Image (spheres, rainbow, N blue to C red):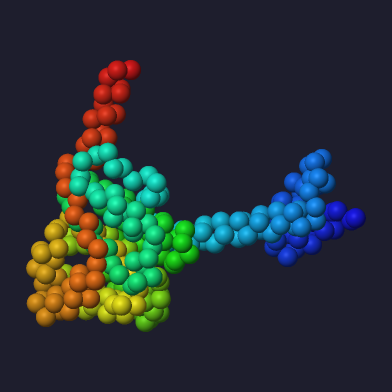
Amino acid sequence: MLKHPTLDKLNDMRLLGMAHSFTSQLNDDHIHQLDFDERFGLLVDAEHLDRTNRRLKTRLRQAKLRQSATIEDIDYRTPRQLDKSLIRQLASCQWIQAKLNVLITGPTGVGKSFIACALAHQACREGHTVLYFRLPRLFSELTVAKADGRYPKLLNKLARTHLIVLDDWGLATLNDEQRKDLLEILDDRHQQRATIVTSQLPVPKWHHVIGEPTLADAILDRLVHNAYKINLKGDSMRKSQSKSLTNTKQKQ
């Protein structure tokens, strides 16, 4: 059999996982103990895994998550009233398929963004498209998009994405343009796509931060009533980590 031409053809067809597995088989003295079906099955499995990993890598790159967080890395030991059973339920990503939302609130430093990014990472694993934004930067990007003509295209991109993360909601009262932009985005996504929001403010205070009562009602109606709510308590985890590092240095 012409071994090298076969590898060349596999690489030329971008069957990289299969090519790598085929090379491994060529270098395995015991591979002939397997029959043709088993060997071919190993090649197909390797190609499937390689393509799955490449697609995941692409989705994560496009998502631009703020933190490299996974469901497995979530800390349940720190007391912050985090419901492990709810996180386990959300990890199934059925809420994304059901077009529901997740609202994560709590004081600064309790891990809101980390949990949001972990859920978003899990969504990428499950084959969903994801986009992460700090809300202030999203508003800035929308303003620039209006100026250069990309605004409709950006709104369409947001509407098509399976899950978007809006981090740092409510840092400042919204102006009229921001309220209208937010309503456009959430109206497109209502009962069509899923959204994660994180905020230092409890949900009852969001109405005031949005500013204009009529638009606030419309925005919250599309966001809050079909959402899972995670309300974190406790001290900043950053302070605990800082104390731990200080104690470690003192012992050294």
Residue 54 in sight: no
Of the 4 image quadrants, the one containing the C terminus is top left
Residue 239, horizontal then vertical, whole percent: 21, 37
Task: Confirm whether residue 152 shows in the render.
Answer: yes
- Of residues 196 and 209, the one drawn nearer to the viewer in this rendering: 196
Residue in view at x 37 percent, y 65 percent: 94
Residue 149, located in which quarter of the rendered image?
bottom left
To which quarter of the image does residue 147 belong?
A: bottom left
Q: Position of residue 136 (x, y in %)?
A: 25, 63
Establish if 136 lies above or below 247: below
x 41%, y 57%: residue:
122
Where does residue 247 sit, x and y in percent of width and height? 26, 24
Looking at the image, residue 32 lies above or below residue 219: above
33 to the left or right of 120? right
Query: Depth check: 226 or 237 in front?
Result: 226
Q: Residue furthest right?
A: 1
Residue drawn 21% across the image and 41% down it: 79
Q: Return the residue nearer the eye: 41 or 11.
A: 41
Q: Quadrant of the N terminus?
A: bottom right
Q: Residue at x 22, y 60 (%)?
A: 229
The residue furthest top is: 252
Q: How many marks?
A: 0
152 vs 42: above or below: below
